[in-house]
Image (spheres, helix red, strand yellow):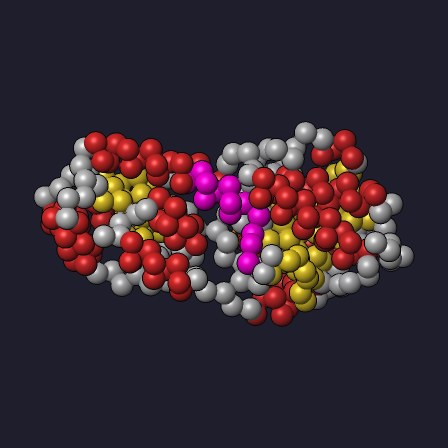
Amino acid sequence: MSSGSKINTIGVLTSGGDAPGMNAAIRAVVRSAIAHGKKVKGIKRGYSGLLKGEIIDMDARSVSDIVQRGGTILQTARCVEMTTKEGQEEAAKAIKAAGIDGLVVIGGDGSFRGALALSTYGVNVVCIPGTIDLDVSCSDYTIGFDTAVNTAMAAIDKVRDTSTSHQRCSIIEVMGRNAGYLALWCGLANGAEDILLPEFYDFDEQKIVDHIMENRKRGKKHHIIINAEGIGHSMGMAQRIEAATGLETRATILGHMQRGGSPTCKDRVAATTMGCYAVDTLCQGKKNRVIVEKRGMITDFDIEEALQMEKELPEYQVSISRELAI
Ligand code: ATP
């Protein structure tokens, strides 16, 4: 790849919720930048650290031994100040004061909106989708999803064993914020009887109760319901279902365990590829881009256009999940 003349120093930060594979992305950005002859600065705790001037010099050794580690060595944060005009102005000033000519932002849609705001103050940004929720509209894949869904799947298998032994009904709540990707994937991978997705849920618990009773008549020994974080209220739902069916019903909220752990091969490779692609994009002189995966290919979009894109749950997978739960 050719090295552009304008970029001398590349900055990198992680923002929003942490996701397994963010470290592999940081490593790729740092080492690729060095390979292109650039200096690298790491910004700690996302936009929050940027506003406090928490900026460190990074070299090849700063990212040793992290490709296999969950979390993010740069740490992350949610920063309300960054949503204000004053905060955005301050953040852009901090980037310029640190001598950063190109900023790599690893995070979700919210983090990209922060990056878009910085770009309006003349900061050149490149974003990498990193979130366990898979809810970045412009990209088919987001770093961390594969690890999180595998972690949840393994946990749900364990709940299923005990659920079958006791002939229980189990509600298992998975993360995903307002998106149902994690719930849908877990539901399919774990063979759940019901998958409650924020995109489709109609709050009709009687339907669930009827489904449980039908399945009992068919001889099913358990009933696994995957509930998405965006619907929530799993504990109350369990009490109401137990009262209506007379069957022991338990709720398990998997919670933050889904964010941690060593990234899968898919996440390490996606993070590494996108990290290097982000640096190449900056070095080619491109401005304000989002790195995405589209139909198996890594490519880049204009950040403003990317943020206007829409993505929906795959209809086919939603329909087959219902077909198989008999
Ligand atoms: P995840 O999907 O893991 O939650 P995210 O990047 O979408 O990741 P958010 O909490 O939505 O997570 O956003 C991260 C940070 O980005 C926010 O704390 C805030 O600092 C900044 N941000 C979010 N929305 C905006 C916005 N509209 N304008 C400017 N900055 C924003």
**Above/below status of 309 relative to 25:** below
> Per the image, is 207 magenta?
no
Count of numbered marks: 0
Q: Position of residue 106 (x, y in %)?
A: 63, 50
**Residue 87 in which image quadrant:** bottom right
**Residue 115 in which image quadrant:** bottom right
- Which of the pair 86/10 is nearer the observer? 10
Question: Residue sitting at 29 percent across and 37 percent down?
Answer: 160
> Per the image, is 151 magenta?
yes
Q: Position of residue 127 (x, y in %)?
A: 66, 56
Which quadrant does the N terminus fall into?
A: bottom right
Is residue 53 at least partly visible in the picture? no
Question: Residue sitting at 26 percent across and 52 percent down?
Answer: 325
Is residue 192 at least partly visible in the picture? yes
**Above/below status of 306 relative to 181:** below
Question: Residue sitting at 50 percent across and 65 percent down?
Answer: 311
Question: Residue sitting at 32 percent across and 50 percent down?
Answer: 227
Q: Position of residue 210 (x, y in %)?
A: 15, 55
Q: Main secondary structure of the magenta part?
A: helix
Q: Position of residue 233 (x, y in %)?
A: 28, 49
- Where is ligand 1, by quadrant? bottom right
Tell me: 96 left or right of 167.
Answer: right
Residue bounds of the magenta highlight: 140-152
Tell me: 251 left or right of 134.
Answer: left
- Which of the pair 141/11 is nearer the observer? 141
